[in-house]
Amino acid sequence: MGRSGAPFATASFRSSPEPGGLHMTRHASRPAEPRRRDTAIDTNGGAKQSMDQSNAPILDALAAVERGNIAGFGGPGHDEGRAASADVVALLVKQAFQADVLTPKGLDDRTESFGVMQQAYRLAAEAWGADLCRFSTGGSTQSIQTAIAAVAGPGDTVLIAGNAHKAAFSTAVFAGVNLVTIPPVIDRERDVEHGTDPETLARLLDAHPAAKAALVISPTFFGVTSDIPALAEICHARGVPLIVDAAWGAAYPFCDRLPENPLRQGADAMVVSVHKTMGALAQGSFMLVTGDLIDRERFVWAFEMLQCTSPSVPILASLDATRRAHVADGQHLWGRVIDLAASVRDRLSDLTDVAVYGREMIGGPGAHDLDPTFLILDVRKLGLSGYEADEWLQAERRVSAVLGDLRHIGFSFSLGTTEQDANRLVQGIRDLLVAAKDGDDRFHRVPDDAPGYASLQPAMASAPALPPPRAAAAKFDRVPYAHAAGRIAGQSVAIVPPAIPRLLPGQAITPAHVAFLQANLEAGAFILDPDEHGDGLIRVVREA
């Protein structure tokens, strides 16, 4: 069963008494004849033909794999777990290793003549309303990398939302793409980053008429979606494709109580993390393309260049099964989750020292709709930071949040969230209030004048002092944050989670950057450190 109790199919295996390779029993659900080689690059995705969404070709193929009398001399080297350490086999159980086969000469034959992956791609494309789909076992990081590589190359310009994941920015940096940051809308009263203002996008596209694409995030890490139809209209009027990082919105096509599917609203490409909320294994993601503004052959080529040649078959199978379950029962599955989240919101609404954010956040530019499965709490009146609230809940109540920042803590409800989980969350928040009132010495009040997200807006609008690829490759020094103002960043600086860069290579470091980062570090933030030298040091481009 899936985390939600949904009737996900499961693979079954039979161990062979003899060592050997893989023997595949062909299931009747597979095509009777090998597919024609001229369909190897599926540029149309098959989404225009109605397909039997009750099929799960990857899951079926995996269930057909069994050990035979073949002497195998290829990977995986653990050979159905026989070569794996006994302690890890005991922890993961042997079936995890039995499922860990390769796609060629395992899930399919050497020439992919059964088209297992191609069928799965077409089924997913149809389910999400796309013309083309590919699966990522490297998370939405790989999906974003593919999307950017498909539309831009060295010297090209891409507009990227300032609150996008670091994957988008790092890909652009190392691809030699000119980055133009789209400042997100800031709710200054709540200190919340929203989505993209259509007027801001139009102004930046007009200022950069050669831009190859615009990439926005919807929903944000606060659960707010952008006005995708308006953004798509602005992009399409200029012949520019709109890419939507909808990592947290993978389930939108399957329940009408969730925000609208961005692909139905005019997006040309969309990235979704099926593992985040829908029940697939970690790192399972889809990249989806529709329309004619993105060259599909180039997209497939980018995918082939960036994908692992030995993708995790268990992840692929979980993606396939998750798609099938959602097509069959997504409305019911997510209706339960939405009701559960609403009940928790209602039960916390009477707390006087915690603000529970809801639909009052939406209505202005960059705040078109709200994902009801997100719960955002403002904890500043408790005399602690969101980071400290996150840490306390994890340590003391074993309740894990998806987001903590200077003033907020956030939770994402998914198919695996149970009534018991919800009760633990409510009680955990109530216990947190008691601990704060009792003066827990792990808590520290965030100053009222601590810099918020709006303090970074002016720097986002500035052109880099040095091209990001040059800055990333330049010789560097490490200096304390307090001494970094006026220098040029030689790295990206991202607080994790949610891994949104607050500085990029090539940016001039301003006093506002320093104040924001120091305030967050003092409040308990964790910043990725490429050199593992500890918090408080940053790479800056060495001065001549």
Image (cartoon, rainbow, N blue to C red):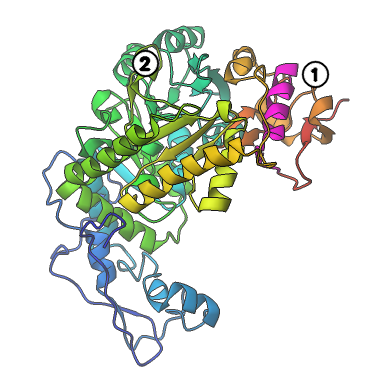
Q: Which of the two residues, 253 or 174, is positioned nearer the viewer here?
A: 253
Residue under numbered circle 1: 486
Q: Nearer the viewer, mark 1 or mark 2?
A: 1
Where disc 1 sits, the SS reads loop
Pointer 2 residue: 235
In the image, 63 versus 416, the foreground residue is: 416
Vertical arrangement, residue 15 with respect to residue 271, above or below: below
In this picture, residue 356 sits left or right of residue 156: left
Classify the position of the N terminus by image quarter: bottom left
Q: Is residue 169 left or right of residue 270?
A: right
168 relative to 4, above or below: above
Q: How many numbered markers are drawn?
A: 2
Which residue occupies 34% across, 71% down? 106
Instruction: From the top left corner, tell me how far across and down residue 270 is, in percent.
Output: 35, 34
Q: Which residues are magenta?
A: 509-529
Tell which of 42 and 221 is nearer to you: 221
- Find the distance from the CA under tag 1 to the CA under tag 2: 35 Å
Percent position of residue 134, x then y: 34, 46
Q: Residues within 10 Å of mark 2 (few under 14, many from 20)?
A: many
Image location of residue 389, percent across then percent down: 57, 39
Tell me: 36 left or right of 193.
left
Q: Residue at x 41, y 25 (%)?
A: 357
**Residue 375, quarter of picture:** top left
Say which residue appears at 82% left-offset and 26% top-offset: 482
- The residue type indicated by label 1 comes to Gly
Residue type indicated by callout 2: Cys
Residue 45 in view, yes or no: no
Q: Position of residue 130 (x, y in %)?
A: 25, 36
